[in-house]
Amino acid sequence: MNLVIGTESAKPTSARRAVRPLRQAVVRRRRPEITGRAYGNDTSRTSATALDRAVQPGTRMLPARKAGPMGPGARPVGPAGLVRRSMVSLVLALGCLQALAQPAASPSTQPGADPARPQGWLGVTLGNPTRPPAEVDATAPEGVPVAAVVADSPARRAGLRGRDRILAVNGKQVSSPSELMSAIKATPPSEWVSLSVRRGSRTMELRAFLEERPENPGGLRTLEGWIGVEAIDLPPDLREHFGAPRESGVMISHIAPGSPAEAGGLSLGDVVYEVNGEPIPSARALAMAVSGGGVENRLEIRAMRFGSEITFEPVVAVRPEKDPGTGKD
């Protein structure tokens, strides 16, 4: 049967049904498939009107593909969003630059410290505060004990000694090393300070002319006590044999000629078991008791000699660079 395409009015109904698939196939071959793409805020560069004209009946549309960098679920950013993000980045950058430009705080710039103001210096090393012996005065203020005095320092020239206890500075009571050091540092150099000091059972007032704190305190030399003796350890049985307590006692093995020990009456073979009320269990303990006894102080030494107890009170001297009796340092 012959079919004439273009004169649909002359076709029978069955002919029209046969031609319809052929027309759809021709449209598919002539019209390329149009896909939607995302470009910023627009879903296509082609306007809606042009797209409507391009899509003919029967044309199959593919789903729109997302732009690669934006990722799934991302939303396009408009001009206002870009401006906000730029402002936030600028503020963060300025904050980082300001933090880097600000110098770190040092101990000299901490609140309450004035780096331009020189600090006073006394020249002592301090021990831990302890309650004084009951026989001295149990109700007296504890004060701050002086462990040692620096050579050629304001404390030395003022007459401070090791084992002194500083009770007050310029009339203000001090009960800890930190309080004492704060009071001294708060006083400028080249000024006098009044020190309330207890030495044994006596309380006295001393005046010190402060100096500027040295740049290298580690190079200073403290005064060490010396009486010119050496000793050896004894076992408990020998201690008891010589009449000393079983827990303490050392035997004097050397006395330097012209030393405070010789002037005080100590002899070779004496068994020293107590210094200033503290037991002496070893030769090292005796050396430490003498070294920290305080220059110009008297030591109370208890010893045994041929079964008799004897008490000596040598005056502590400054330790020489070399022992005059042995040449030892």
Image (cartoon, rainbow, N blue to C red):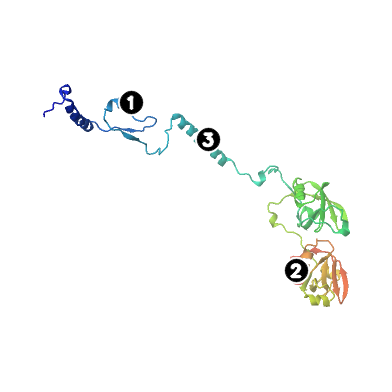
Mark 3 to mark 2: distance in Å? 67 Å
Q: Residues within 10 Å of mark 1 (few under 14, many from 20)?
A: few
85 to the left or right of 156: left
Q: Which mark is residue 284?
A: 2
Amino acid under label 2? Answer: Arg
- Is label 3 in contact with label 2 (beta carbons under 8 Å)? no
The first of marks 3 and 2 along the sequence is 3
**Which of the two residues, 75 or 289, is positioned nearer the viewer here?**
75
Residue at point 59% right, 40% down?
102
Amino acid under label 1? Answer: Ala
Residue at point 52% right, 37% down?
92
The residue that mark 1 highlights is 48
313 to the left or right of 22: right
**Which of the two residues, 249 or 324, is positioned nearer the viewer here?**
249
Q: Quadrant of residue 51?
A: top left
Local secondary structure at mark 2 = helix
Q: Is residue 26 above or below residue 141?
A: above
Image coordinates of residue 218 in percent, x first then y, are 69, 56
Local secondary structure at mark 3 = helix
Amino acid under label 3? Answer: Val
The residue that mark 3 highlights is 91
Q: Residues within 10 Å of mark 3 (few under 14, many from 20)?
A: few
Image coordinates of residue 298 in percent, x first then y, are 85, 63
* Closer to viewer: mark 3 or mark 2: 3
Image coordinates of residue 88 in percent, x first then y, are 51, 34
Q: Quadrant of the N terminus?
A: top left
